[in-house]
Structure formats: C-alpha cells, structure tokens
Image (tube, rainbow, N blue to C red):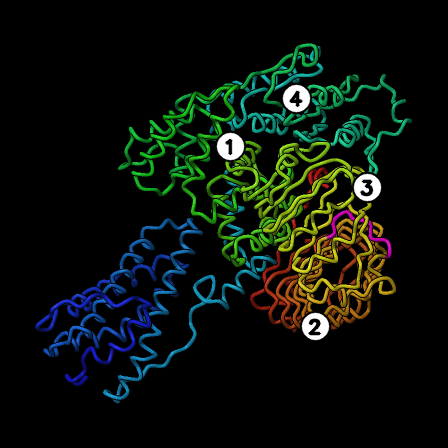
Amino acid sequence: MPSSLNSQTIQGSISPLLGLAEPQPKPQPEMAVTDLFAGEIATELLKMLFSISRKSALCKPSAEELMASIQELLPIIQEIKYSGVELPAARQRQLDSLSETLRGGIELAQKALASGRWNVYKNLQIARKMEKLEKRVRRFVEGPMQAHLLADVHHLRFESTERFDRLEGSARRLEQRLGAMKIGVSEGGWLQEAVKRVEDEERYEGSLINLGVGMELGKRKVKEMVIGRDDFVVVGISGIGGSGKTTLAREICIDDQVRSHFNNRVFFLTVSQSPNVEQLRSRIWGTITGNCISGSNDTIPQWNLQYDFRVSVRTLVVLDDVWSLSVLEQLIFRVPGCKTLVVSRNKFPPAVINCTYELELLGEDEAMSLFCHSAFGQKSIPLGNNENLVKQVVNECKGLPLALKVIGASLRDQLEMFWTSAKNRLSRGQPICESHEIQLLERMKISVDYLPEKVRECFLDLGSFPEDKKIPLDVLVNMWLELHDIDEEEAFAILIELSDKNLLTLVKDARAGDMYSSYYEISVSQHDVLRDLAIHLSDCERINQRRRLLMPRRETGLPKEWERNMDWPFNAKIVSVHTGEMGEMDWFKMEFPNAEVLILNFSSNEYFLPPFIDNMPKLRALILINYSTSNAVLHNLSVFANLTNLRSLCFEKISFPLLPDTIPMKSLEKISLVLCKIDNSLDQAVVDLPHLFPRLSDLTIDHCVDMTELPSSICKMQGLKSLSVTNCHSLRQLPPDLGKLNSLQILRIYACPTLKKLPPGICDLVWLKYLDISQCVNLECLPERIGSLIRLEKIDMRECPQIRNLPNSVRSLRSLHCVICDEEVSWLWKEMAMLNLCVQVAEECFNLDWLVEK
C-alpha cells in the first residue's frame, strides 16, 4: 500500500458512521499516537473475537463478521502507523473516534466472554450490540472509505454480502429458527432447553430428600394422617405462601404407598381465591361416584345424589390453594371411603379439618443446598466465592423455599457488589411470618429489581391473568409483542430469562412427546406468591397513573377505587377485569386513552361488553375468558365497529357472535376461539370473512364441539399463515378448496375423531411447513399427492390407527425433518430410508389432568 495513504481517506466517513459530534480540537504538532493505539486495539480485539467465535453460539456469526472487517481495516491502520506522515488535527480526531469504537468493541467482547452460556436474554442483547458494531465498522469499510481508497489505491477491493442472521446474528436465520421453534422441527433450541431445565428442576424438588429432613418428616406425618388414621376424614397442610405446601402435597399424590392404599384413585384439584364452586363440586362428586360428568353444563344431577353409600370405594381428593372456609365446606363430601387433603395458607378449625400439619421452613443446611442449586447449579458454595456473604444472603431468606429459589436464581452469575446489595436490602426487611405477607413480597422484590427493564415489565404483565390458570404461550407472547415493541425472538428470550430466574414455569402439555414439542404444546404457569408480587409492584403508583389496572381476584362488580377516580383518564396500558355477570348498568364511564390490552375475565351466561371500549382508541389485544359452566352470550357488539387498531382477539367459552361486518377490522391478524359455540356464525351466507378480516394470518379453533364443517369462506383468506382446528369432535370434513390458502404454513387438525379424510386440495399448500393430524382416530390415509408439499418440515400423526400405509409420494418430501407417529407406522417411515428424517415414536400418555384446565 503506498505511503501516501493517510487519515484523509478515513476523515470524511468516520463521523457519519459513528453518529458522534466532533470533539474539540487539541493542538497536535506532529503525528499523534492515537493511530498506534488504534492498531494495538484492533489487534487485541481481533484476538478476543477469535475466542468469542469459539465460545458463544449467539455471538459467533457477528464476531466472525467483525473479525473479517477488522482484518481488512488493520493493514490500513498499520500503514498509517508507519507512514510517518504528520496528520492535521481534524483528521487525527477521526482516528480518535475509530480508536474509541474499537475500544468499545473490546469492552463488548469482554462481556460476551464473561456471559454464562444459559443467560439467553443477556447473550441476545450482546449479540445485537455486536451486530451494530460490526455493521458500523463494515459500513465504514464498504462505503465512503472504499470510495476514497479506490481513488488512491487501485488494488484494494472489498466485496460485501449480507451475512448476519437473526438468531445466530442474521434476520433470515432467526426467522427460520423461530419458525422451527414454533413447530418443533429440531431437537434442542431455546424453548426445548428451557422446558427441559424446568423438568429437571421439578425432578430435583420432587425428590424431597433434596429439600432436607424437614420435608421428609412432613411427608411421613402427612402420610400417617392420610393412610394411617381411618378416623380422619379431612386432613390438612398449612403454611406461609412459598413454603412448599403444594410440593409436599404433590409428593403425597405420587407416593406408591398412598396410591396403592387408594387403588390409584387420587385426584388433585386447585381451588384458588376465585373458584367456580359448582364446577369443582361436580368434578369431586364425579370422582367419588365414578360417574364423571362431561359437557359444558357441569352440574350435579339429582339422580347422582342417590349414590349407594354402602359401597365404600377409597378415594383421596387433594384440594390445593384453599382460601375460604365457606368454600371449603361446600367441597367436602363426607362419604364412606373418601378422604380429603386440604392445602392452605390458613389453618382451619378442628370442627372442619380433623388434623392439620403445619409445614416448617427449611433448616440451615437444607436452605443452603436449595439456594446453591439455584445460584450455582450445585449443592454447596463453589470455591473462590465469598462464603460469608453467601451465608448471609441465605440466612435472610429465612428458610422459605420459594425465596431461596428465586433470589438464588436472580444472583446467578452476578458480581459480588450485587450480592452485597441484595444482602443489605434483605437485612432491612421485617421478619417473615404468617402476618407479614407484604414483607415476604418485599424480599422477593429484590429478584425483580435486578432484571433488565423490558424483562421486568414482562414479568409484571403476568399479574394480569387469573391465579392458578395456565396461560397459553401464544397469548402471552402476542401480548408482549403489542405492548413492548419487541420482536418474537426477543419475546422468547425474555420468556426463557424469566423461567431461568424461577419467576415463571414453562409447562409442556402432558400429551406432547419428550422432544420436538411445538410452540402450541407449551403454556406458562406462575406460583401465586409471584403473581401477588407482580400485582404488588404494579399497584405502587396512584391508580390513574398505573401502567396496569388490575383486579387481583373475582368480584361482583368493578372496584370502588376505580369508581372514585373515574373523573380522570386512566393511564393504564393493560386493563384486566374479573367479575361475574355484568349488565349495561353495572359499568361506569371510564377513559383509557393509552390502553393496548384489555382482558375480561368473568363467570356468567350473559355478558354486556363494557362501553368504555369505545374510549380505547389504541386497543390492540382483546381477551375474553368465561369461567362459567356454559357459553356466554355477548351483548353490546357495536363496540367492535370502533376497534380499528385491534390486532388480536381471543374468546374462551363464548357463543361466537355475529360481528357487524359493515366496517372491516383491517388490523386484526389473530383470532383464537376456545370452547366457543360457533353455530353458523362463520358461514359464508352469514358473514364475509375475507371482507371482515382482510389481514387475518392466524386462526385457532379449539374445543368447539358444535362445529361439524369448517366454513368454506375461510379458504378465501389469502393471508392466512396458520390454521389450527383442534379437539372439535363433531368436525366431519374440511372444505375441498383448502388448497387455495396460498400462504398457509401451519395446519393443525388435531383430535378431530369423526374426520375420515383430508381433502386432496391440501396437497396444493406449497408453503406448508407443519401438518398435525394427531389423534384423528378415524382418519383413513394421507393424500396420494402429499409429496407435492415440498416445504413440509414436520408431520405429527400420533394415534392415527386407521393409517396403515403411506403413499409413495412421501419420498418427494425433501424438506421433511421430523415425523411423530405410533410404533406401527414408524416402520413404514423408516423403510422409506429418507435422508435427514427423524422418526419419533410417540409415548403413550394416560394422564388426563389437562382436562381440568378446560
């Protein structure tokens, strides 16, 4: 390179690249040493990037790109370094800026090397910062600098390509990885690893020996009450929230001696603060008598009351999270052979419960072991850590298992100054006891304070959902997308960060296999103390200024506090209402100029939609969940005409209404109908779906048992990318024009037992990636032309016993990576000898606990 090359080539391009104001000029009579520093910094950064490319999967592509850019830049810096040319002050300032950029790269590289492998959210943020740094350097190298160099040095050329991907660094691969994660086409990945870690944690805690002799002692005493004392009809476990009551109760449920004593008739039900007593009574009575009641109207028939009590069948009913004595008295059936185990924070009187075991908190050794498991991944303090500081933090958790888990996880991989700060803040708290629930929440608050801002906000959003209910993963992720201006991969990274911190639990559907489970088979649950914490932190501001306006539990009407402040607008972005039946006169005028998510939880047969929806101009997501025993009829449907910005609509146990179709809902992208009564409300003769929902891309219909045919008008929705029709037991056929859904990528026809054939048109879905026909027990065959689905990556066909042959065209499925099926069919796939195809034999699952959630 000619010695005439100097910083003038670089001068015109560094400032626009960095977006920095020029520093004040300093007198520099001769060549400064900044260019020397730039060369040394670039060399050091190059070494660190090489280390990163070997260690971090998320940062590796960006590190490699940055290495390539610096390797192009380094000879130029070295040329300037040894050229001996005196640089004017203005040009020297540009090299100062370049040095600062590269020095910032070293700091970023150090963070990447220090970051733990499982800290997905932090690694994603570092990867994105490294992407920005790489793009700034690359933009400089390929842009203005290249033009100047071509004028001065004719032999320098630089060919640029778009190489950075989205999950590993580039938009394309992140999108592909996200798609793979949704449909479960590859083993491993963020979501799978997170779910596996949760299952490992549950196995660790499920073995009470890991929680110490105190829990083992508790188990022995409760077992004695349950199977050793026939005179005890109702027994209990009590203790402060987060002390491990539910863990102990579940251990009793799976104990071999207990199950043998009750002939496997052991049933676990969660009651909660807002129970549907009628529904719970129906389920309990059904388990006792063996006459399980099905259908939406779960009431106890009068003939069941004539049950022959002379027939004694041993049954254990476990009632978890009981708050009210009046509710408990309605749920106890004192019949021969039936025993009830009540789990509660309260100790109920002996007149109701014969004997109660008061759960003790963990001892010193047990507390240390559990804490170290969460903080360090082992049972003791690792060498090199401040042992005294760790013991002080553990001591301040006061033996409370939930606090030990959550606070331990929050301090994982943190610097000592964070540990010291946590210890100091914990030591200022008041003692934890049954009368100090707020003090417990203040201690738990520490684990949330250390979260990044967006992660913290997403945690607080969890308080918007009812207690003890599983939150569908797609509903939660969709809400975060609307609220926090993040994309899907960041939402998943946040989800996993919260799971790793023990602030939520990822729950895989019991019917899903060990691997390749999809986005749709995972839900989110949360300990009620953590939900209380989210609500407590959300309620700190004045009511009109809160970001979230929440009703923690069901009430007969809106809170009086809301009514007292109705004269001023509410600033909330999330509004969550939990009531019984609401008529027009039960609402009062409220203004929500910034509300983006409205969650309406209720329990009634009829429901008048709140008029204040008209005063929610920014509403993006509307969620209606009915907890009554029958479908609710909605009134005041005119509010839908004003929801021009609504993007997501979720109905559960609703009689799907005839929406006004005069004004299209042009922004609506997702509709979810669960346990809804559809009748003919989606028929083409009644409503023009493509006109009403022109941008719909995701449609879910689940447990809609009255639907016999999928409306043909759905086939005209050209933008539809995901269609999920599941547990629709009356569905007899799919429309023949299904192949006209030109954009469809995901098709789930799951657990539709009366469906016998798939329409041949399904083979025209050229963009289809995922086909789920599992538990379609009468489905006779796969379509002959299924090989036309050249982009199909996964087929789930477990429990399809009528399919005994495969079409020859399946050999043409060149993108197919995964098939889940029964053992009989697995041999047919294996005989095809298709490259890169993993055939997974589905496990038989007889666990029906998931039915309780419906």
Which element carries disc 1, helix, strand or loop? helix
Q: Residue at image x 69%, y 57%?
A: 643
Q: Quadrant of residue 714?
A: bottom right
Which-is-in-front pick, marks 4 and 1? Answer: 4
Who comes first in sequence, dot 4 or dot 2? 4
Q: As displayed, is residue 695 above or below residue 145?
A: above
Which residue has dot 3 on it?
606
Label 3: state its secondary structure.
strand
Mark 1 or mark 2: whose residue is earlier in sequence: 1
Q: What type is the residue that disc 2 sits on?
A: Asn
Mark positioned earlier in the residue sequence (2 or 3): 3
Mark 1 to mark 2: distance in Å? 48 Å
Looking at the rendered image, the disc whose residue lies closer to the viewer, 3 or 1, is: 3
Q: Which residue is mark 4?
A: 342
Image spot of residue 497 (x, y percent): 47, 47
Where in the figure is residue 836, as x and y percent of width and height? 56, 66
Number of other residues with Cα within 10 Å of mark 4, as a class: few under 14, some 14 to 19, many 20 or more: many
Pick the front one: 370 or 575: 575
Residue at point 41% right, 25% down?
429
Mark 3 to mark 4: distance in Å? 33 Å
Q: Is residue 542 visible?
A: yes
Residue on which disc 2 sits = 742
Residue under numbered circle 1: 205
Identify the magenta region: 673-680
Q: Residue 605 vs residue 559: left or right? A: right
Between disc 3 and disc 1, whose residue precedes?
1
